[in-house]
Amino acid sequence: MTHVRTLAASVAIVAALGVTAPGSAQEAGDDESVTRSAELVVAPAGNAAVAPREVLAQSARGLADDIATAIPLPRGGTYSGIRWEQAGGTFTSAEIALVLQHNAACQWLRASRDGRETPTSARVLEDVPSWPAWRGSETGTALAQVVADVRAGGGPAALAMLADCDAAHEREVAYAAARNLTPAR
Amino acid sequence: MDRRTVRACLRALSCATICVPLALPAAAAAQVTTDLVNWNLTESTSTWPSDFHISSSGDGWAAFRWIDSPAKTTVISGNSCADLALYGQAVIGVGNTAYHNLFHANPGQCFLVRGRTSIGSGSMVNHDGRVRR
């Protein structure tokens, strides 16, 4: 009986702390995010690995769904709020990958700020400046400063990007809801 | 030249070197420019393949101009990197190579530049443009 009480207390403590039991589905998801992010770090720069295609904006969401499988998102994350249809025109697969990676970077940054999925969010954010859409470019340098700010517990670059990401998220929720899609958390 | 004339000359010279620079207007904010070389536009909106950021040294405006005189009326926009929301746009007439403000934002804000020619005007190829940010 004592063992049962001890076990129950342990479960309660683990649940309260949000700690994941080793080998759980949640932990597997975290590992998968870290693995996918690490794969992006070694993918050719400029999204050169993405098969070249060009589609009308009305078809961009479908192609984005295919490309998105390679890009990690926090739990509850989606790309449903991206305004492909409203933006109109055409998109190449490299442009779609660029927007998806920006969107994913925002979702990981918000997750980190909100204390979700730590330490996974911290590990993925460390990779973000090296993702192929902007590796070696001005954007990569800017994102490295954002990550340095996060590591230091805050800073102007992280604050500015978070403000942009929060504004984008608010728009995304509205756009996804209008299309009966599940918005990102 | 007597001594008074020499002094007057020295006063004038020192004013020319010290006073005149002080009287000039303050230097304009050092904005960052990036050239978009050989941009091909059609009547369907397309995206320049790399992203941009509002610089910390500029005035916060993202602006665009054609370097090559445009043969067609064009519509150029600035859109969010994360969700493609429209931040602002400009309609640029034939032959207009002046800067056009697209939108104003805080330093660091990421944006994409998209563009098209006016409906019914056909395509415009290999024209260079410039983003000031």
Image (tube, grey):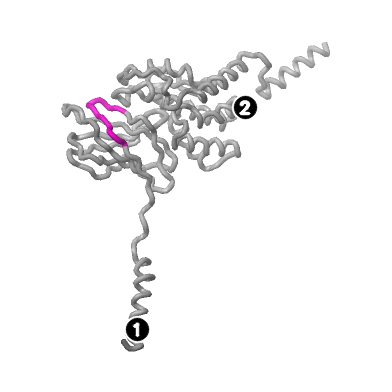
Start and end of the magenta stretch? B36-46
Neighbourhood count class around disc 2 (C-alpha, 10 Å): few under 14, some 14–19, many 20 upward: few
| Residue visible at 48% across and 37% down in the picture | A141
* Amino acid type for the residue under numbered disc 2: Pro
Residue occupied by mark 1: B6
Q: Which mark is residue B47?
A: none
SS at mark 2 in the image = loop
Q: Position of residue A137 (x, y in %)?
A: 44, 35
SS at mark 1 in the image = helix
Left/right of residue A156 with respect to residue B58 in the rendered view: right
Dot 1 and dot 2 within a common chain = no
| Residue visible at 48% across and 22% down in the picture | A43
Is residue B51 shown above or below A92? Answer: below
Query: Which of the image's four quarters has the C terminus of chain B?
Result: top left
Neighbourhood count class around disc 1 (C-alpha, 10 Å): few under 14, some 14–19, many 20 upward: few
Predominant SS along the magenta part = strand
Q: Which mark is residue A119?
A: 2
In this rendered view, identify the residue nearer to me: A104 or A174: A104
Residue extending furthest toward the front: B1
Q: Is B44 in the magenta?
A: yes
* Amino acid type for the residue under numbered disc 1: Val
* Alpha carbon distance from label 1 to label 2: 76 Å
Tell me how many marks there are: 2
Q: Position of residue B85 (x, y in %)?
A: 36, 30
